[in-house]
Image (cartoon, rainbow, N blue to C red):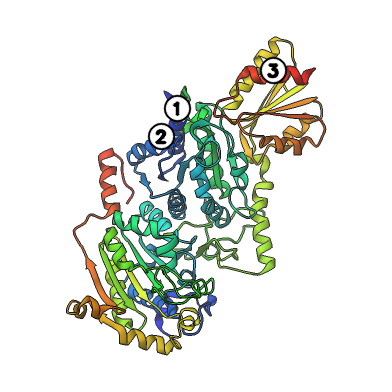
Amino acid sequence: MPSTLIEKYIRESHLPHIWCAGCGNGTIMRDVIQAIDNLGLDKKDVVIVSGIGCSARAAGYMNFNSIHTTHGRAIAFATGIKMAKPHMKVIVLTGDGDAAAIGGNHLIHAARRNIDLTVVVFNNSIYGMTGGQFSPTTPTGEFATTAPYGSIDPNFDIPELARAAGATYTARGTTYHVPQTIKLIENAIAHDGFSIVECVTTCPTYYGRKNKKGDAVKMLEYQRDNSVSVAKAKTMTAEELKGKIVFGELYVDNEKPEYTKEYEKIIEIAGGRSDE
Amino acid sequence: MAERKRALLQGNEAVVEGAIAAGMRFFAGYPITPSTEIAEGCAKRLPEVGGRFIQMEDELASMAAVIGASVTGTKSMTATSGPGFSLKQENIGYAALAEIPCVIVDVQRQGPSTGLPTSPSQGDYMQARWGTHGDHPVIAVSPSSVQETYEETIRCFNLAERYRVPVILLMDEIVGHMREGIEMMSPEEITVLDRLVKEDPEQAAMPYDIVPGEYVPRITPFGEGIYYNITGLLHDNWGFPSTSPVKNNRQTTRIMNKIIKNAEQIEKYETDGVDDCDTLIVSFGGTARSAEAAITIARENDYKVGLFRPVTVWPFPEKALSEICDHVKNIIVAELNFGQMTLEVERIAKGRCEVTHIGKVNGTILKPNEIYRLIREVSR
């Protein structure tokens, strides 16, 4: 029997999806849907915003108010939606290139404002849609079509970048740790402020093949064997943590004021009447 | 008649008042000379009417936020000048393809690149039409006075809503910073148009399916329980990506046709003394003020000169100008650039009369005397 989630939330007429066999993006899309269902959100008030790339195609498969925007700008579109309708839950689905390269400026400024958006980053460490170029999260030394001799670019830690910029909820999940990742996304959506969950996903077609990581199963096993929980990571040295995926809730701040709520105060000071 | 409010405003301030009168409730922008007063005005005025203002991190984000707000049914605007107008182009194309109403103000300044930030220009005329890549529809409107700026800003919002296109309010630094006394209309005098939606929820779920006899889709805003997809990819009637040559051709043709077929409703122009003139001046925006002064001098000296001033500059009021081309000897196109509208006028004149361009690209305005000298020259 198919999952009831499919009937409730998936545009079945637009399947099959375009993702390659072994791609983890479908897993993350399901995690997001499960998190929305667990929270019992009214679909009417949920907007799914995506940018450009493999990750971005998830928006079209999800039966919500969905908008597939331009490369890198999903968070900026989402900011406009949230400002116009602060009661809406605005969820951004983006990739490592979309969020941290071309869209890096929007990521840090939305984090700085602490505007109530939830950003789910599908991090496959590569540009998949264009055929395997290195991204800001490709580990230094690894290979890509535009790094045929190995990448000399240092890589970003996206949740750390967002935290430094002012995000008030940061977390990391993987496509191996499904129940944990669902909970992280759930907490992120429920959080009143800018939240980001990086989901480490598998791209056997490009990242895997270029770097001899094996098939999808091997790549998932790699996630399992190289992930450490936040609690365990605290007991480990920097040397021991090298190359490890630290997953779980990385940073939570419930004190910093949320941007659209602050703007409601501006409307009050100016003597206007908010329709929210 | 209800009382009108009189005010001494600069053009940029009149944009803010016009926009609010038209129902704008969201503005996203980034500081840039000579348009900044529009952002400043929106920051102050929008919360007073329950609207919202945000200063974004850059021009690209401002344009994106405006489209985001508009998909929820909120009338939205951004304002910029040359460099920022260039940066906004990708998302202007998005609004054109996905058919999201919005207003973009470009207060033109001189030169490519950083150019002369505080000096007037009309060098973005062609960019307003073809700035973003690919064939796409657009409307551009260029006012010549502060009063007209106020009224045309309202019309820009109505055009955006009616045709679901990005509308460019193509200002220039002359009008943007010019101060004039204006009359602001009372709410009951102002026509405000809102985007149309479909009544039947089942039909509404197919947002780009066009009602027979219409060219513009009726799309329900986000948040009303109608679930559909919006994308910048060429798409089908459901808003889903499509690579079908038949559907792609149908969509691209329709979005162009919705402007072409409705051109006469969108066009607006002013003429003065065109019926019996030998020489016609075509001019728009702030430069038209110099042209008007030149015509006054020329008439005092017995030259038969007329004025054609397009207010809607894209689509160009082609039919109206073409009729005049049948009987005038000369056309002078006065514009603050190297000859951009001149190309459009030459295309329409099709060799029926001499077309001469007069312009300037040094950051100063065209003076009436300079235009008058050319009137004398071409009249010999």
Q: Nearer the viewer, residue B149 or A38?
A: B149
The answer for which chain carries disc 3 is B
Task: Name the residue carrying label 2.
Answer: B37
Q: Nearer the viewer, mark 2 or mark 3?
A: 3
The answer as to whether the residues below labels 2 and 1 share one chain is yes
The answer for which chain carries disc 2 is B
Task: Name the residue carrying label 1.
Answer: B10
Q: Nearer the viewer, residue B176 or B164?
A: B176
Give the x, y percent position of residue A242.
28, 78
Q: Residue at x 52, y 41 (%)?
A: B82
Label 2 to label 3, Cα distance in Å?
Answer: 36 Å
Q: Nearer the viewer, residue A70 or A266?
A: A70
Within the image, what quadrant is residue B46 found in? Answer: top left
Q: Which dot marks residue B338?
A: none
Asked if the residues shown at circle 2 and circle 1 are in contact, with their CB atoms under 8 angstroms apart, the answer is yes
As shown in the figure, which amino acid type bears the numbered disc 2? Glu
As shown in the figure, which amino acid type bears the numbered disc 1? Gln
The answer for which chain carries disc 1 is B
Q: Residue at x 75, y 39 (%)?
A: B347
Mark 2 is surrounded, within 10 Å at the Cα level, by few (under 14), some (14 to 19) or many (20 or more) other residues, namely many
Q: Does the image show residue A55?
A: yes
